[in-house]
Amino acid sequence: MTTLSVPVRTKRRRTRRVPPVLIAFILVPLVLEGFWVFWPALQGFYLSLTRWDGVSAPEWAGFGNYAEMFSDSIFQTAALNTLIWLVLFGGLSAAGGLGLAMLLQRERKGIGFYRAALFTPVVFSLVATSLMWQVLYQPDGLVNKFLGAIGLESWQHSWLADSNTALYAVLIPALWRQIGYVMVLYLAGLKGIDPTLYEAAKLDGASMTQQFRFVTWPQLRSVNSVVLSVIVIDSLRSFDVVWAMTKGGPYHSSELLSTYMYAEAFQSLRLGYASALAVIIFLLAFGVIVTYLVRVFREDNQ
């Protein structure tokens, strides 16, 4: 008997070729990001380990710049002011932005005008905003005149020249500009909440406070992450408003890490120490944001 041999067809796996255009769309942004972001960041960390005046060759200092911070009284003042700024600027802008967003979320006649008016300060330059508020804080400015008009003459003084009030006086213009931006972020989040959730909560007899606690706030979790990131980054890089109004004075009472870093880099020409301050600012921002995101991630997985 003869056996017929049946040819076995081997299936060849077809390898799909990635289009060159797709590779270009991935590689080009990655190269640009590495050139403009990652490489300067690595250079900044390297400079933080050196002593450099911007002209001569950098001298290796190891962690000497970081060790110097422990005995630097100006750094300690700037770090404390930065933490105060972060808490007040972040907390008040988030609370104020959320409150205004909830107040203006319903479509009513003329509501667009109020939204635009509250968002207008965001469009202004921070330097122009600072100069305007600097005029208001003058001894004969509108703030002192208003206090005198309502019978609070004892409160009148030079707000920016007083070391007890300079930091908080500078904080108000920054909040005036930031609250409108946070309001827009929360408005977008509130518009994305399903109205049927509120209807079901009302049928269950939930009060306004309970609706906010069990419906609004959980639905804004993703928006809160964006708001926190924006607030922390804006807080730690706040420079324009402080430098334009007080330059960190008087007697470093309104000094922030950002203004101290600028002064050390471009006035004292200590770019190595200024780079170390920049690393501290980055670590502070990274730590706050990552801590919040990790906590939110754990809550979602419970």
Image (spheres, grey):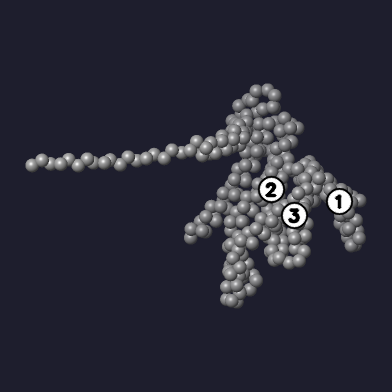
| Residue 10 figure quarter | top left
Q: Relative to 108, say whether 43 is above or below.
A: above
Dot 1 amino acid type: Leu
Q: Residues within 10 Å of mark 2 (few under 14, many from 20)?
A: many
> For mark 1, does the 10 Å Cα neighbourhood hold few (<14), some (14 to 19), or many (20 or more) residues?
some
Residue that label 2 marks: 235
Q: How many marks?
A: 3
Q: Label 3 belongs to which residue?
A: 119
Position of the N terminus, as image quadrant, is: top left
Mark 3 crowd level (few <14, some 14–19, many ≥20, 10 Å Cα): many
Residue 240 circle label: none
The structure residue drawn at horizontal position 66% and vertical position 55%, both measured from the top left corner, is 185
- Whole-percent x and y of residue 54? 69, 27
Residue 296 position (above or below residue 269): below
The residue pinned by badge 1 equals 136
Residue 197 location, quadrant: bottom right
Is residue 84 visible in the rendered structure shown here?
A: no
Residue 76 x %, y %: 69, 43
Farthest residue in the left direction? 1
Residue at 39% across / 39% down in the picture? 15
